Amino acid sequence: MGAISSPALLVEGLTKRFGDRLAVDGLSFSVGAGEVFGFLGPNGAGKTTTVRMLGTLVAPSSGTAMVAGLSLVPANGVEIRQRIAVMPESPGLYLRLTVAENLEFFAGLYGQRNMSVQIARSLEAVNMGARADDLCGSLSKGLRQRVALARALLGDPAILFLDEPTSGLDPVASREVHELIEGLRGRGVTVFLTTHRLEEAERLCDRVAILNTSLRALGRPEELRERFFSKALVVRTLAPLTEPERVFAIPGIESWHTDDTTGYILSVSDARTAAPEVTRALVAAGADVLSVSEDRHSLEDVYLELVNEDVEASR
Amino acid sequence: MNMQRIGSVVRKEVREFRRNRFVIGTMAVLPIVFLITPMLTIFKIPADASGPQVKAAVGTISLLLLIVPIALPPVIAAYSVVGERDQGTLEPVLTSPVTPSELLLGKAAAAFVPSVGMAYAIYFVVLISVRLGAAPVVNDVVWHPPQLVAQLLFIPLLALWAIWVGIGISTRASDVRVAQQLATLAGLPLLGLAALFSYQLVKPSVPLAVGLALALLVVDLVAYRVVSRLFDPERLVTGRHGRDTDQAEAAQAFNASTR
């Protein structure tokens, strides 16, 4: 994802209080059109409240936002909801109605003229075309989630808010939802994905925001990794080095420490340049080298770093 | 106000109720109970019964028949909001373009049509039975024009009252059954107004019937306004009210006017 042009979402200082409790504090960010944007945070971080504010369901206490080109102000409520779709964590289907009847209801609410075509298209998009006449009550959780996604696609939304779309799904069903989100990206739909499954965010999202009441970090997953963790090489040898300080005294290595008796973590400015130099130095020192690899931090590491900081700060 | 959205709500509600055994069972049993009692009472009145005796009996029957439009709508209306919340469907609906007014009117219409239809059907069965087989003194009182006008006007207006009470309680209740029971009880006081007429405590006349009907209409409109204010999407979804916040007024205004 390149630079953000014509933001689908532009949020400035969005805040929500429930009584004395501050649920969301001064959020500011933007989401580009066609971007898959991950919104991460622990339980109670304010993710769902933010989605509800942007979906006009909950009134912000302060702050402003532009949603799908419309200002988040009272007069634009219906028009904003016409341009977006929200898929809450719970599928929220009428279990006594069939899949098609559920979608027909929402197609009517979105003012669809050619309902049957739109319903068929939405069901095909989630591979549920053959289950249109099934009662929703008879479907598994994964299938219900797919129907909820089909419902969200009915109005051809410019922005699709997905609140924990894979919560409670088995790995196969989760993977199907991931593929559907990839498909939406291909169709140019802006996806605002709320999740606390970090591998999901890392895999799907162009950029992620980490929230814990206030915004803690924002950027592409690799940018966040670089921002929060220095680059490092992990060296493993068969036996401990006799003079590691001499071996690692080469340009490009900023510092080093032992991981265990036969492991060394080297802080480097550029892992790709440093790795061959380190390997040569180890061989020259007669070390039996098992591996020299880049220490890759995941988005989970970034997340845990930030959340742990907050826990520490609150003590 | 978008009629397509209201129509969609009505269709969805009707489909749901048709597949809800509790609703169907109640809607089937209640009318039978309210039909049998008046019929037995009517045909037990002897031909030589005194005027006051006949008026008292017919008053009871008329009042009983007016309980139908009060007792039936809560079965549906009380389910309308708490039922949606129970099955987690309220949030998807409220994040669609439908406005609370459209949602409430759609739900009210879905409860109004079957309830009033059933109440009228029972009334017409009683009317025809009286014409065909009851004593002439009973026929005269039942087919008395002010009585007919009152019954025909009061049925839909009492049903509307019961519907708004039902929906209002449903926005605050946490359990469907409790909402239904409370809504039926809360609907009954307005029956007192109709009782004035049924028992002929006031001298029945067509203008008086129309006047009382207009009074009921005003009550219904006020009830609709109250229910519209009770229907606070933020509170329904989060369990908390914008009023709790220090930005209370702004939040409340936002909710009201975005919808």
Image (spheres, grey):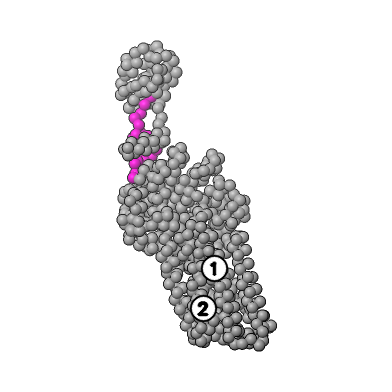
Q: Nearer the viewer, residue B214 or A90?
A: B214
At 34% across and 16% down in the image, what residue appears? A244
Residue drawn at (51%, 87%) of the image: B203
Q: Is residue A77 visible?
A: yes
Q: Which residue is mark 1?
A: B73
Per the rendered image, the range of residues in magenta is: A214-233
Q: Position of residue A105 (x, y in %)?
A: 54, 60
Amino acid type shown at disc 1: Pro
**A277 lies left or right of A187:** left
Q: Is A265 situated above or below A132? A: above
Q: Nearer the viewer, mark 1 or mark 2?
A: 2
Same chain letter for marks 1 and 2: yes
Q: Reading the chain from its start, which is encountered first: label 1 or label 2?
A: 1
On the question of residue B108 being in view, the answer is no
Q: Quadrant of the N terminus of chain B?
A: bottom left
Along the line of sight, which residue is nearer the eye, B36 or A310? B36
Residue A295 locus on image (x, y percent): 40, 27
Q: Nearer the viewer, residue B109 or A82?
A: B109
Single out the residue that lies furthest toward the right.
B133
Tell me the amino acid under the disc marked 2.
Answer: Ala
Asked which secondary structure carries label 1, the reply is helix
Chain for numbered disc 2? B
Q: Residue at x 44, y 38 (%)?
A: A198
Q: Quadrant of residue B259?
A: bottom left
Question: Of helix, strand and loop, which one carries label 2?
Answer: helix
Q: Which mark is residue B194?
A: 2
In this picture, residue A153 sits left or right of residue B124: left
Q: Position of residue B145 (x, y in %)?
A: 57, 86
Residue name at image x 38 percent, y 57 percent: B241
Residue A227 highlighted magenta (yes or no): yes
